[in-house]
Amino acid sequence: MIEKTKKYLNVLTKINYKLIIMKSTFKFFTIVILCLITTNCYSQYYTGQKVFKDKFPTENKDYNQDTYIKIENASGDIIVAVENTYTGKVIQHAYITSKDTYEFKYIPVGNYVCKYMWTDSKGKKRYEKDNSTMDFPKNQYGGYIITLTETPLGNLSQSGISESEFFD
């Protein structure tokens, strides 16, 4: 009888260890899966990401110019492209997440406008361009701050542009 009890306890102990290992493994995989899901959901785009580097030329910066264009975004993600008005070429662009700020640095000598791309609440892509320009003369320090505010008609003087005009 004692022999049978020892065997029975031995079997129970092995089963108990297997259950503990299975529970630990389940907890581990649950944590790994949650981490993967969280990472996947929150890492699609980030402020400053160059989401269209295949559609725009290589970034143009002049490290001798201590200049900037700072964009303070309202609610809703947006892509901003800085275009040289003389050449019509985009010198820098960036994705800016909702309620975040991004600074385009080392703007070369020239005259520039910002172009904007976003998706509205109905899922339609929108493209606009500032009507006023920003001048960056030689040896200038500092820059411009553009604060995007969510209002029915916007807070900047802009004109609608086409998708092809945005990427030109």
Image: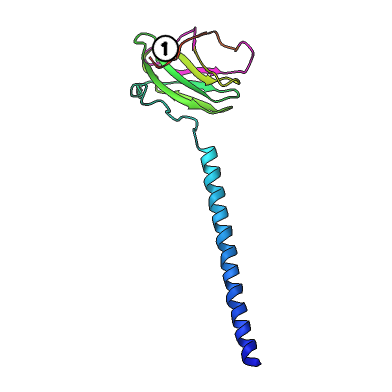
Residue at 60% across, 68% down: 20
Quadrant location, the C terminus: top left
Q: Secondary structure at mark 1?
A: helix
Residue at 47% across, 15% down: 115
Q: Is residue 9 left or right of residue 137?
A: right
Specify start and end residues of the magenta stretch as a single range.
Answer: 129-153
Amino acid at pointer 1 = Glu
Residue at 57% across, 53% down: 31
Is residue 62 shown above or below 44?
A: above
Q: Which residue is mark 1?
A: 165
Is residue 154 shown above or below 4?
A: above
Asked if the stretch drawn in magenta spans residue 63, the answer is no
The percent coordinates of residue 117 (x first, y second) are 49, 19
Residue at 41% across, 14% down: 164
Q: Quadrant of residue 109?
A: top left
Q: Quadrant of residue 90?
A: top left
Front residue of 133/56: it is 56
Front residue of 108/127: it is 127
Front residue of 135/1: it is 1
Front residue of 115/22: it is 22
The percent coordinates of residue 7 (x first, y second) are 60, 85
